[in-house]
Image (cartoon, coloured by chain):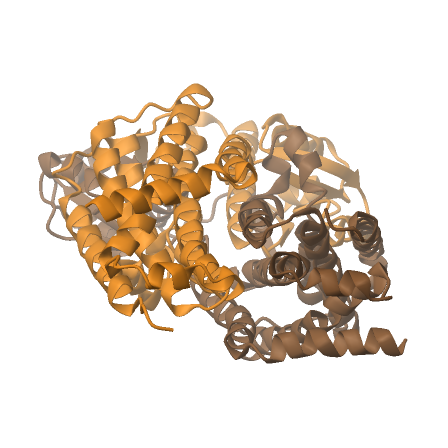
Chain colours: A orange, B brown
């Protein structure tokens, strides 16, 4: 016990005597948490539209007015050359080109039928799909109005219509930040924990001080615990700061209890730190440790469902998230912060995380060699 | 010159004598391109939804059948009552619930109007929106087909052409982004530790007492990583074309030279980090934590830049990956020529010069 206390004292001194690292550990997550969620706006809006009007009739004018009246589309240019419009798309200045054929008005009135052409930049498939669908619905609306101009209402036999009402649970204002902030906080806590823990033992190896520890009677588990506890405390501190920031700046108060978050985070940090320590027992230089932990972190983070939904991944990737601690924490954070889930709701996640923590840490202790 | 070559040789030995790092450096970009090329998509498909059918008539049966047939949805069968909805949402079992009221068919056929309720889990507003849109489209489709094939007067049709990506594949958007990200992070990290490491290990002193000039030290540090990155670029492009089916529409020479230019830019950034820091840990924290999120979030491949607040849009201009992402998208996917990317190329060249000049200026030839 005494040995452990002395080890802890050493580790804390080491951390606090390097102000530049300390600054980085705290400032970077804070700045990123303040800035990044502002960038995370997925909503498809500001679709930039270019209209090619060969008709220039009162009908085409009405249609264009109807489209630009929505704040969904930004009219980039109104032109009469398709080539010119295409250049906008090539330059990435427009996402959508709507082409109104010449004699559009005449065709609608005299031939009962006309066709509009829409070209979309489909590299970002989601934006193309939603923007296109929205434009089509505006055109359909316009079509209905135009029909009413020519047909008397009664002649229009009543259509059976299905009315759809939507309710958005848990986040009625559809605020994207409420969704992103908890996730980004998870990433920051994870990165600090995993990277620092991974670098720490390796640094002792590289600098040579590990020899000194190896010749002392300190037990392997004491050594690992001595490394683990300081970063565990740091991780929880960053989590606390992060929660305060999301409260103060984004006005996010978890619906569920803070206790649930902390209980899970405590176990989660053990798992993440265990992973970092495991990496550091494998690596010989800080460079290797960093590359290895970065490799895993990047996969864990990008496949963890922060940016893209896990449900839309291919089956093998979905299975891989079962072994991804980051995915569990992101899910739990969102469940607690947005839906108010309790410890009982997340008991599965919690027990899996326990297993992760135990397996990773015992592996790290086992793999740490006192001999070189 | 000979001195410089010796120095390059030394750097090569450094790299080649550390096979673990070499394996990681070659393996990492490839695995990442593969994993993310296949797995990253912001399409919504196979989402689990619940359908509560309180009417159980032929009409609802048909609508449900169409919802089930859609590749967007995966209907969870065992949710049978309103009370089960809330826990199902809370445990994350379903993302959307569609509720048909009693006597749906009767209302629809006799009162000409029936209502459906859709409850979405809006924790992820994007997914919620997309899901309700898809479900609405399916139901409206059914409604329109009910009318039969009657031709309406005064009909305006819309013909849609999908430019550049007719099959709407997610990988067309993600492959250029992942390329930018992988190159950016690997290159910056590698060089960012290279100078600091010599400082930390004490070998810097030996270099400083030699007659070699700072610019040679810095360039010699870049050469091995530059060659390594060129190999990586080659394999990434091969994988994109042959495994991920993302074709190179534009000029291959142009694309490769832009990739190499970007590599140099990022190597320069790494060196800059390296010459202003004094410990490997700090250099790595800056190059990873400092670059990771901004590269993902501000380069425009995850989140549209035009949606961001104006100050962030301005900040995004200093992220080299943003310009590179644009270039790759334009050349590789759209198949356009140099004419369309010269501005972005100039910006990258400017950044490269800036990074190199500053790191040479900041390179201290005296120990403190």
Indicate the quadrant where residue B348 lies: bottom right
What's the residue at 54%, 69% (across, down)? B29
Query: Can you say whether B21 is above or below A18 in the image?
Result: below
**Image coordinates for residue A160, horizontal then vertical, percent:** 30, 37
Query: Can you say whether A192 is above or below A370 in the image?
Result: above
What's the residue at 50%, 35% (across, down)? A37
Task: Look at the image and tell me in which quarter the C terminus of chain A lies.
Answer: bottom left
Residue nearest the observer in this picture, A351 or B64: A351
**Image coordinates for residue A58, horizontal then vertical, percent:** 72, 30
State left or right for residue B234 relative to residue A154: right
State left or right for residue B341 relative to residue A302: right
State left or right for residue A184 relative to residue B70: right
Residue nearest the observer in this picture, A286 or B243: A286
Q: Is residue A18 visible?
A: yes
**Image coordinates for residue A35, horizontal then vertical, percent:** 55, 32
**Image coordinates for residue A238, horizontal then vertical, percent:** 40, 34
Circle count = 0
Residue at the farthest right position:
B1
Residue nearest the observer in this picture, B66 or A219: A219
What's the residue at 61%, 61% (across, down)? B201
Query: Can you say whether A117 is above or below B250 in the image?
Result: above
Residue nearest the observer in this picture, A147 or A84: A84
State left or right for residue A150 relative to residue A224: right
Query: Can you say whether B245 is above or below B261 in the image?
Result: below
Q: Is residue A256 visible?
A: no
């Amino acid at each position: 016990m005494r040995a452990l206390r002395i080890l802890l004292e050493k580790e804390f001194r080491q951390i606090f005597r390097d102000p530049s690292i300390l600054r980085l550990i705290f400032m970077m997550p804070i700045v990123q948490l303040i800035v990044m969620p502002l960038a995370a706006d997925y909503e498809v809006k500001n679709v930039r539209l270019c209209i090619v009007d060969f008709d220039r009739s009162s009908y085409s004018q009405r249609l264009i007015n109807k489209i630009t009246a929505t704040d969904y589309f930004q009219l980039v240019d109104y032109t009469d050359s398709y080539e010119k419009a295409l250049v906008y798309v090539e330059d990435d200045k427009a996402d959508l080109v709507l082409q109104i054929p010449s004699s559009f008005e005449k065709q609608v009135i005299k031939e009962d039928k006309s066709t509009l052409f829409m070209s979309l930049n489909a590299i970002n498939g989601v934006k193309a799909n939603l923007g296109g669908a929205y434009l089509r619905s505006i055109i359909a609306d316009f079509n209905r109005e135009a029909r009413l101009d020519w047909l008397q209402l009664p002649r229009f036999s009543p259509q059976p219509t299905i009315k759809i009402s939507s309710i958005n649970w848990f986040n009625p204002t559809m605020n994207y930040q409420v969704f992103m902030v908890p996730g980004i906080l998870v990433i920051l806590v994870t990165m600090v924990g995993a990277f620092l823990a991974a670098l720490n033992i390796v640094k002792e190896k590289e600098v040579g001080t590990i020899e000194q520890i190896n010749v002392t009677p300190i037990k392997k588990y004491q050594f690992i615990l001595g490394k683990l506890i300081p970063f565990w405390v740091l991780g929880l501190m960053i989590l606390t700061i992060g929660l305060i920031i999301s409260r103060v700046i984004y006005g996010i108060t978890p619906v569920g209890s803070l206790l649930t978050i902390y209980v899970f985070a405590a176990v989660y940090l053990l798992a993440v730190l265990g992973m970092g320590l495991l990496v550091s027992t494998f690596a010989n230089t800080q460079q290797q440790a960093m590359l290895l932990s970065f490799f895993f972190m990047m996969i864990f983070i990008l496949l963890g469902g922060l940016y893209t939904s896990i449900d839309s991944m291919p089956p093998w990737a979905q299975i891989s998230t079962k072994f991804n601690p980051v995915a569990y924490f992101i899910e739990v954070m969102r469940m607690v912060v947005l839906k108010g889930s309790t410890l009982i709701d997340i008991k599965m996640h919690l027990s899996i995380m326990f297993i992760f923590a135990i397996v990773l840490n015992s592996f790290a202790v086992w793999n740490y060699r006192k001999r070189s | 010159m000979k001195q410089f070559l010796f120095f390059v040789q030394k750097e090569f030995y450094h790299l080649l004598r550390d096979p673990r790092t070499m394996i990681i450096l070659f393996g990492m970009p490839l695995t990442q391109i593969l994993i993310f090329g296949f797995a990253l998509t912001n399409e919504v498909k196979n989402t689990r939804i619940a359908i509560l059918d309180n009417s159980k008539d032929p009409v609802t049966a048909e609508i449900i059948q169409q919802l089930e047939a859609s590749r967007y949805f995966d209907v969870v069968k065992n949710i049978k009552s309103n009370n089960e909805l809330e826990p199902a949402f809370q445990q994350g079992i379903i993302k959307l619930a569609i509720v048909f009221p009693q006597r749906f068919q009767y209302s629809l056929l006799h009162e000409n109007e029936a209502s459906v309720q859709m409850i979405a889990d809006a924790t992820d507003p994007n997914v919620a929106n997309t899901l309700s849109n898809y479900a609405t489209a399916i139901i409206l489709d059914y409604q329109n087909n009910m009318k039969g094939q009657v031709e309406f007067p005064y009909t305006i049709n819309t013909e849609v052409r999908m430019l550049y990506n007719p099959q709407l594949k997610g990988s067309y958007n993600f492959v250029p982004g992942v390329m930018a990200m992988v190159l950016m992070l690997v290159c910056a990290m590698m060089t960012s530790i290279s100078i600091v490491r010599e400082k930390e290990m004490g070998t810097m002193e030996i270099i400083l007492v030699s007659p070699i000039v700072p610019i040679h030290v810095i360039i010699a540090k870049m050469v091995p990583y530059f060659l390594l990155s060129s190999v990586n670029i080659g394999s990434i492009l091969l994988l994109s074309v042959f495994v991920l089916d993302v074709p190179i529409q534009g000029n291959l020479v142009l694309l490769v030279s832009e990739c190499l230019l970007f590599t140099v830019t990022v190597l320069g950034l790494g060196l800059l980090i390296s010459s202003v820091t004094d410990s490997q840990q700090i250099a790595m924290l800056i190059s990873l934590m400092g670059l990771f999120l901004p590269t993902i979030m501000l380069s425009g491949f995850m989140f549209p830049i035009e949606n961001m607040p104006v100050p962030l849009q301005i900040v995004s201009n200093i992220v080299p990956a943003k310009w590179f992402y644009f270039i790759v998208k334009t050349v590789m996917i759209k198949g356009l020529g140099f004419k369309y990317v010269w501005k972005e190329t100039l910006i990258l060249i400017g950044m490269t010069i800036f990074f190199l000049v500053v790191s040479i200026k900041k390179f201290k030839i005296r120990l403190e």
